[in-house]
Image: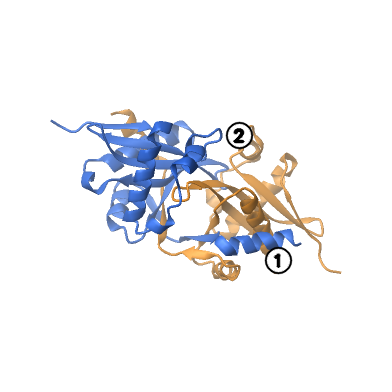
Chain colours: A orange, B blue
Amino acid sequence: MPSSLNIRPATVTDLPLILSFIKKLADYEKLPHQVVATEEILRVSLFGPKPQAECLLAFLDDAPVGFGIFFHNFSTFLGRHCLYLEDLFVVPEKRGHGVGKALLQRLAAIAVERGCGRFEWAVLDWNESAIEFYRSIGATMLDDWRIFRLSGEALQRMAKEEKEK
Amino acid sequence: MPSSLNIRPATVTDLPLILSFIKKLADYEKLPHQVVATEEILRVSLFGPKPQAECLLAFLDDAPVGFGIFFHNFSTFLGRHCLYLEDLFVVPEKRGHGVGKALLQRLAAIAVERGCGRFEWAVLDWNESAIEFYRSIGATMLDDWRIFRLSGEALQRMAKEEKEK
């Protein structure tokens, strides 16, 4: 019997599951020390009065196997909002069943429905299987862009310089 | 007499100025063909009932010399919103007056005020002067991340696959 794959938006009762996926993803990306999210923080961010992101959950034969967290970003050149997939994760033991592709298809449909000009996400450059998969669905790697981050003490210092003007 | 530098949030009457800066930025990035934004599109995106991004303008001796367009993105690991600077631009003839740094300081202060865990932006890898400047203020380049983009026909095709399930 073929597996039954189902995708639905997360609700507030899914918070423990979402947090468990976030921690599994961080382990996979070798960044577990970066996770400071808690159920209470996510309750406000995802399900509060002003949600900052949305979450889709994927189930294979009713067992949760993956998730995607996304939000709208903005393209200056297009002048409009776009869809940005912050995280996509499928538990390693359930890869190869089309769960990741199904999540991307659902997100592409959401992007088109909402009038988003494009749909983007980031990938670690050593994750060759993910890169191959993304190319196979027609996505393009923006090879010449790099991300800069200001955080921690450097962020506080810049903010302080502004206050002291 | 030293130049007087002033930064303020853009208002709807600044739309022609904002669009002119977007076009100048696209020329600088060698991507002028990618600009499809118009004043009418930006009016909705920046000043409509549900703004998708915010804009700061910089003035040197009352003459407009630069802008920054930013929005909130979301970090799954932090579980909260962060500040993302989509575009930063200073007209080439007014560089070296601290306008870019002043815009970044104002944005850092906004990030801290709003409880953002971090402040990020992207840069083209050939833009060495920008990269040197960003490093000088304590920002870190995330060398191992690459952006993927699904747009145009590939995006429509994925959305169609979802609809045909």
Report in which chain the residue with disc 2 lies: A
Are the residues at dot 2 and dot 1 in contact (C-beta closer than 8 Å)? Answer: no
Picture coordinates of residue B134 (x, y %)?
A: 32, 49
Q: Mark 1 points at which residue?
A: A98
Residue A115 higher or lower than A97, as above or below: above
Nearest the viewer among A53 and A38 is A53
Q: Which residue is drawn at 39% across and 43% down?
A: B19
For the view shown, which residue lies furthest in the top direction? A164
Q: Residue at x 61, y 52 (%)?
A: A111
Res B99 visible: yes
Q: In which quarter of the image is the N terminus of chain B?
A: top left
Res B117 visible: no
Q: Is residue B117 left or right of residue A37?
A: left
Give the total of numbered labels.
2
Disc 2 to disc 1, C-alpha distance:
32 Å
Q: Name the residue under label 2.
A: A50
Q: Residue at x 72, y 65 (%)?
A: A94
Picture coordinates of residue B31 (x, y %)?
A: 38, 58
Q: In this view, does A41 lie to the left or right of A160?
A: right
Picture coordinates of residue B55 (x, y %)?
A: 41, 38
Indicate the amino acid at tag 2. Lys
Report in which chain the residue with disc 1 lies: A
